[in-house]
Image: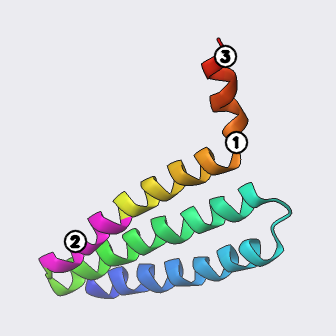
């Protein structure tokens, strides 16, 4: 079973290569941000798989921290990229 977990972790790391291509070639800032979110999600998945393989609870804590940081990053990106939505909401 550990071999399967490690194979899945390697597959996810290869998936990051495709995400890196999108970050470098993305036509818009939103595409680049979604690729960065892919990095965060993949990092969480890899850490959970490695925690299951090694039996380390500390890796699960780090995965939880990465998940929280990914959510905060997405909110900060939206607030910075589309500030006119907030101005329109305040006017109503």
Label 2 or label 1, whichever comes before in sequence order: 2
Residue 6 is left or right of residue 35, and the answer is: left
CB-based contact (under 8 Å), mark 1 and mark 3: no
Badge 3 is on which residue? 91
Query: Which quadrant would residue 69 be assigned to in this image?
Result: bottom left
- For the C terminus, the quadrant is top right
Q: Marks 1 and 3, how far apart in space?
A: 15 Å
User: Which badge, 3 or 2, comes first in the chain's sequence?
Assistant: 2
* Residue ID for mark 2: 60
Disc 3/disc 2 C-alpha distance (Å): 44 Å
Q: Is residue 15 above or below residue 31?
A: below
On whether residue 59 falls in the magenta region, the answer is yes
Q: Is residue 17 left or right of residue 59?
A: right
Looking at the rendered image, the disc whose residue lies closer to the viewer, 3 or 2, is 3
Percent of width and height locating residue 19: 66, 73
Q: Depth check: give the residue in front, 6 or 25.
A: 25
């Amino acid at each position: 079973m550990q071999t399967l977990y490690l194979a899945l972790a390697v597959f996810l790391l290869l998936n990051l290569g495709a995400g890196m291509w999108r970050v470098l070639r993305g036509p818009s800032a939103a595409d680049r941000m979604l690729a960065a979110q892919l990095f965060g999600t993949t990092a969480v998945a890899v850490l959970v798989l490695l925690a299951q393989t090694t039996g380390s609870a500390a890796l699960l804590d780090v995965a939880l921290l990465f998940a929280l940081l990914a959510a905060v990053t997405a909110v900060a990106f939206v607030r910075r990229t589309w500030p006119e939505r907030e101005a329109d909401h305040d006017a109503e």
